Structure formats: C-alpha cells, structure tokens
Image (cartoon, rainbow, N blue to C red):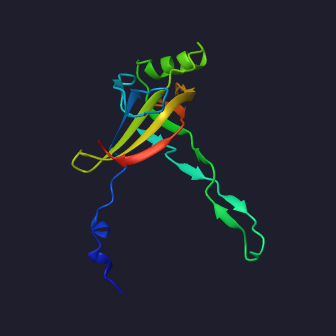
C-alpha cells in the first residue's frame, strides 16, 4: 500500500473561506461568459456568499435482463440560488440592478459574476464563475431601533451555469 504523504495533493493546506472577492462582468448573450470587461456594480465587499452548488439528477433506466437495480445515466444539472450578503451602505447598485431587471423590464440585462477565493497571502487561488446571473431577490436589513448591529443586505442570484477553475 502506498504512503499517502507521497501524493502532492495530500500535502496542500486547506484554504480559509473568509478571504474572497466578488466581481461583476457584462455577460454576452451567446454564453461566452469570459468575454467582457468588469462592471463597477458594487464597490462594497461582501461578507458572505452561499449557494455555490450544482446538482445532477441521474436518469434511471430499467434495462431488461438486469435484475440487480436500474442503470443510472447523467441527467439534467440544476444550480442553487447564490446569496450574497454585505453590510448595508448608501450605495444603491444592487437595488438598481434588481429594479432594472425586475421592475423596469430589462430582461436581458444579466451579468457574469466571478467569486475568487484567495490564499493566506492574498493571491487568487480558486475562482467560481456564474453565467448569465439574474437578481431574483433583494432584501434590505431589518430595521430595529433597539439593536446595535450593522445592517446586512442580501442579493439572491439565479444563473445559468457554474464554472470553477484556477483564478485568473
């Protein structure tokens, strides 16, 4: 049996998830998600990002003569809604994008979203890209005169593709 320390991947240190950045880019309608420049949509940093997941629903095929279960083939892939949270500021960029798409009927105004995880030295390590992102929910902070917390706003994004690779 081989020693697991001989495998280079087993010597890598896990990345901390608190150092990441989110950038928005114009997204082409032909789904070429890396083709356009960045959009200064939100200058504030995000404190939390959830929903970076893809799920493949397998297709079950019951073949004749195979009595020990069904054959499974790859099926349709679905993507979770990505939720971005940040401390509320006076910037209205996120609300303006949501309002433009959902209230003013600018259905085609979608953006590509790049979420880059950085290593301990601050260098880009891994990047997830969302293709043709569409804001589906905006939530402002709950207002409470008794509390002393910072207000946190949320932006929920539906998208048509999740890609992961080395950071550019």
Residue extending furthest toward the front: 64
- Front one among 150 and 118: 118
Res 148 → quadrant: top left
Residue 26 left/right relative to 104 = left
- Front one among 70 and 11: 70
Residue 88 left/right relative to 2 = right
- Front one among 38 and 45: 38
Quadrant placement of the C terminus? top left
Residue at the (65%, 57%) spot, across then down? 58
Quadrant placement of the N terminus? bottom left
**Residue 99 against residue 23 in the figure, above or below:** above
**Residue 73 against residue 7 in the figure, above or below:** above
Residue at the (55%, 26%) spot, across then down? 138
Residue at the (33%, 59%) spot, across then down? 14
Which percent across, then down, holds residue 80?
57, 43
Residue at the (39%, 28%) spot, across then down? 25
Report the label total.
0
Res 66 → quadrant: bottom right
Whether residue 53 is visible, yes or no, is yes
Residue 134 left/right relative to 167 = right
Which percent across, then down, holds residue 75?
63, 53
- Front one among 158 and 51: 158
Which percent across, then down, holds residue 42?
39, 24
Which percent across, then down, holds residue 164?
41, 47
Whether residue 150 is visible, yes or no, is no
């Amino acid at each position: 049996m081989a020693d697991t320390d001989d495998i280079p991947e087993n010597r890598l240190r896990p990345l901390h998830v608190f150092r990441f950045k989110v950038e928005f880019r114009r997204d082409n309608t032909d789904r070429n998600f890396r083709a356009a420049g960045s959009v200064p949509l939100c200058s504030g940093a995000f404190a939390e990002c959830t929903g970076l997941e893809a799920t493949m629903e397998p297709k079950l095929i019951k073949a004749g003569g195979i009595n020990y279960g069904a054959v499974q083939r790859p099926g349709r892939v679905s993507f979770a809604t990505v939720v971005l949270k940040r401390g509320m500021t006076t910037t209205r960029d996120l609300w303006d994008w949501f309002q433009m798409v959902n209230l003013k009927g600018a259905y085609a105004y979608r953006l590509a979203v790049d979420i880059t995880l950085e290593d301990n030295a601050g260098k880009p390590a891994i990047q997830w890209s969302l293709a043709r992102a569409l804001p589906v929910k905006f939530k402002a902070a709950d207002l409470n005169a008794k509390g002393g917390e910072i207000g946190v706003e949320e932006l929920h994004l539906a998208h048509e593709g999740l890609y992961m690779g080395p950071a550019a």
